[in-house]
Amino acid sequence: MKFGMMKTHRRNQLLLIVVLIVGAGATLALVMQALTENINLFYSPAQVVAGEAPTNQRIRAGGMVVVGSIQRAVDSLQVSFLVGDLQSAQFPVLYDGILPDLFREGQGVIAGGSLDESGVLIADEILAKHDENYMPPEVAQIMASQQEKTPP
């Protein structure tokens, strides 16, 4: 009889293959879930103002520090400032900590943190450009797209 009981070593091999496939699937599912939870999405000032950025979730947002918008607390390291896109979109950032040495008005900045319900980015990380020729790629892309939109 050609089709009958499966031999023991074949059954063991099949069982091993099934266990490996299930294990690989479970590992892939866990890795995908971890990546989804820890993803840092970047938003431009226009997207933050338009409400496209999620609230109470970690994001990165960047643009240019608006001239005249930096306000420092007298009794703490807390700093608040506006980030804009050289157009009309601006959003407030609140940061409690030591700012990078190159942080100043009119310079490119990326803030990492979470957006609260009132539209203020509560930042736990501030990145500033490191020399006169560098601008973070995300900020440079936003500035280029804004310049393309403005009529000559």
Image (tube, rainbow, N blue to C red):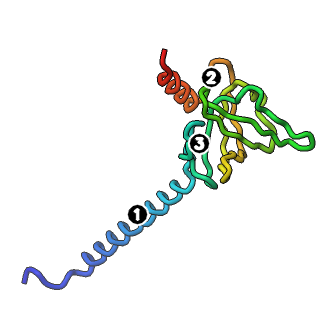
Q: Secondary structure at mark 3?
A: helix
Question: Residue at horizontal 92%, vertical 43%?
Answer: 75
In percent of the image, x 68 and y 45: which residue is there?
121
The kind of residue tagged 3 is Val
Badge number at residue 48: 3
Which callout, 2 or 1, points at the residue further toward the start of the chain?
Answer: 1
Which residue type carries mark 2? Answer: Tyr
Mark 3 vs mark 2, foreground winner is: 3
**Residue that extends furthest to the top in the rendered view of this protein:** 152
Where is mark 2, residue-wise?
134
Q: Residue at x 67, y 32 (%)?
A: 109
Q: Residue at x 66, y 47 (%)?
A: 119
Asked if residue 115 is positioned above or below residue 74 in the image, the reply reads below
Mark 1 to mark 3 CA distance (whole Å): 39 Å
Judge from the rendering whether residue 35 lies leftward or rightward of residue 84; answer left or right: left
Residue 25 lies left or right of residue 47; in this view the side is left
Crowding around mark 1 (Cα neighbors within 10 Å: few <14, some 14 to 19, many 20+) is few
Residue type beneath disc 1 = Ala
Image-quadrant location for residue 11 = bottom left
